[in-house]
Amino acid sequence: MGSESNSQNVKRLYTSNMGDQILADAARVAEYLRQQGVSTCPAAGWWWREYQRMAVPVGPVSWDFTVPPETARQLLRELPRCLLVRATAGLQEAITSWYAVVVERFVDLADCEAKVRSEIRRGLKHCQVRLISGRDQATQIARVEHAAFTRYKDRSRPDRAEVICERMRLAAEYADVIHLWGVFHGEALIAYAENYAFGKTEVFYSTIRLDPQQLALYPMYALVHEMNRHYLAQQGVARVIDGFRSILHPTSVQEFLVRKFGFRHAGVALQLHYRPWVGLLVKALVGLGAPYPFLPGAVNAVATQERLCRSARVEHGRAR
């Protein structure tokens, strides 16, 4: 879908009700992603994006994005690289199998456990945390991004420095919804975060990168503490989210946030629509039971997600 068509659809879907700031913010985030080369398209009144071969909605986790089969088929036509549509139906506390990692309340230093309070204070002593401009800090952000990837054990690689710099300059044009935070030790940037803001409803911590050579300065503690303070205590945002349950690559970051900063696993109802051949494959794999190590990780991830989706439906049904 061309950029002109995308822009027209943004206006039609998201500015018909000028009072709905959430929809307008979602449109801005979708346009930011599209300008990076991410495939996006409108359907059923929302914007959707390609993410790990799935069509997923752009918007707050508390919203209901479920779609009928005909809309799912439209999405799979518009996003031909996607193998399935993953939609969510809002927060459902009775569900435990599929969840988002969220926090709704800022935990002040006085209310932290003694060890966590000490760690945050160390971070604040050594580091300065503030909102930054991607245009001004692009080169330093690229350096941190490349340093961060040296810690990762998988085969992922960072974008080239010039690509990262261009993305940061683009983010500066969308600063109303794309918030960049920097952690500085003196004049040097040692960590950064990129967040997507959906009005007062939700902020999504999309990316956090740390220079591994500077972890002794506790930059993660300072960064999360100050971002939570800003959004939850000062701006009155309803919740912060760090994403959904990870299947393809286990992450220690989410459990770190739960242990240290009051994040929790909030149940989310899940809906999956597959391309026909993918649905047949997933059905066969789920019938086999546990994942098999000789299958590609992404295939096992899809089958695992289907099992979790079925469990979530059962849990939701019991709670009704």
Image: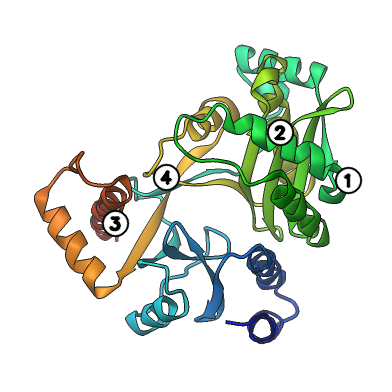
Which residue type carries mark 3? Answer: Cys
Instruction: Give the spatial CA distance, label 4 vs label 2.
Output: 26 Å
| Residue at mark 4 to residue at mark 3: CA–CA distance | 12 Å
Which comes before the other along the chain, label 1 or label 4? 1
**Three-letter residue code for mark 2:** Val
Task: Find residue 144 and name its label.
Answer: 2
Q: Is residue 312 left or right of residue 294?
A: right
Label 1 and label 4: CA atoms lie apart by 34 Å
Residue at (12% x, 47% y) in the render: 289
Which residue is rendered at x = 46% and y = 29% of the image?
153
Classify the position of the N terminus by image quarter.
bottom right
Residue 313, label in figure: none
Q: Which residue, given by chain and number where applicable, does mark 4 sit on? A: 245
- Mark earlier in primary sequence (1, 2): 1
**Residue 236 in view (yes/no):** no
Percent x, y for residue 188? 84, 27
Q: Which badge, 3 or 1, comes first in the chain's sequence? A: 1
Residue at the spot of label 3: 309
| Distance CA(mark 1)–CA(mark 2) | 14 Å
Q: Which of 261 and 130 is in front in this view?
A: 130
Q: In this view, does 151 lie above or below 51?
A: above
Which residue, given by chain and number where applicable, does mark 1 sit on?
A: 136
Can you say whether 138 is above or below 226 in the image?
below
Secondary structure at numbered mark 2: helix
Q: What x and y, as percent, mark residue 194? A: 69, 46
Image side of residue 316 versus residue 285, left or right: right
Tell me the crowding category of disc 2: few under 14, some 14 to 19, or many 20 or more residues within 10 angstroms, Cα based. Answer: some
| Residue at 23% from the left image edge and 52% from the top image edge | 307
Q: Nearer the viewer, mark 4 or mark 2?
A: 2
In contact (CB < 8 Å): disc 1 and disc 4: no
